Image (tube, rainbow, N blue to C red):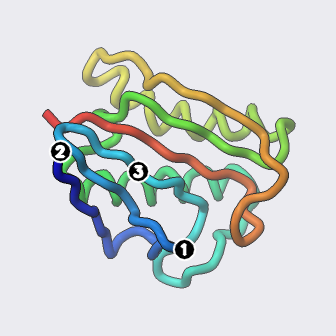
């Protein structure tokens, strides 16, 4: 099955040898997004909540470039460096995905959440996603 890369100018450039996302068939596989401001290439200030919001905004921009949105996400993985941040991450995540869950009467995406020793550029959180194109 052929695959194609997705590239969005509204999300940070990849900081390594990977694509922002890959489309294969009706699936979109988004690489992990951290809280980088696409304009500056720097992590946003304000701690884990601000980084989570920016990571979701970046993820949304990549999804949009693939022709889908957060409402098409079926699975996410959240990586965090401190499990004590879990509740703050959930607050931001809930607000971002609840809009679609309520509006479209859809369930939240399936999700895994894990702690890691470190993330690129000193980020506190990273979120990756898989979405379906209709």
For marks 1 and 2, the one nearer the N-term is 2
Q: What's the distance in space between the residues labelled 1 and 3, CA to CA?
A: 14 Å
Estimate how packed mark 1 is, as few (under 14), some (14 to 19) or many (20 or more) residues with alpha carbons within 10 Å: few
Q: Residue at x 57, y 69 (%)?
A: 36
Secondary structure of residue under mark 2: loop
Q: What's the distance in space between the residues labelled 1 and 2, CA to CA?
A: 25 Å
Estimate how packed mark 3 is, as few (under 14), some (14 to 19) or many (20 or more) residues with alpha carbons within 10 Å: many
Frontmost of labels 1 and 2 is: 2
Q: Which residue is mark 2?
A: 1
State whether residue 115 is above or below residue 58: above
| Place of residue 130 in the rendered image (x, y in percent of width and height, measured from the top left) | 38, 38
Residue 73 placement: quadrant: top left
Frontmost of labels 1 and 3 is: 1
Of 121 and 42, which appears nearest the observer?
Answer: 121
Q: Which residue is mark 3?
A: 30
Quadrant showing the N terminus: top left
Would residue 112 appear left or right of 39 to someone viewing this image? right
The reply to whether callout 1 and callout 2 are in contact (CB within 8 Å) is: no
Residue 21 placement: quadrant: bottom left
Q: Which residue is mark 1?
A: 16
Q: Residue at x 27, y 62 (%)?
A: 6
Q: Residue at x 45, y 76 (%)?
A: 13
């Amino acid at each position: 099955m052929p695959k194609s890369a997705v590239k969005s100018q509204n999300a940070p450039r990849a900081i390594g040898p990977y694509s922002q996302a890959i489309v294969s068939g009706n699936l979109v596989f988004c690489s992990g997004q951290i809280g980088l401001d696409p304009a500056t290439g720097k992590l946003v200030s304000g701690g884990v909540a601000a980084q989570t919001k920016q990571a979701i905004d970046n993820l949304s921009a990549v999804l949009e470039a693939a022709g889908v949105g957060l409402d098409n996400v079926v699975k996410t993985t959240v990586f965090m460096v401190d499990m004590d941040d879990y509740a703050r991450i959930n607050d931001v995540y809930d607000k971002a995905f609840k809009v679609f869950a309520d509006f479209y009467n859809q369930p939240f995406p399936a999700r895994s959440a894990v702690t890691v020793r470190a993330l690129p550029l000193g980020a506190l959180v990273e979120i990756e996603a898989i979405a379906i194109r209709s």
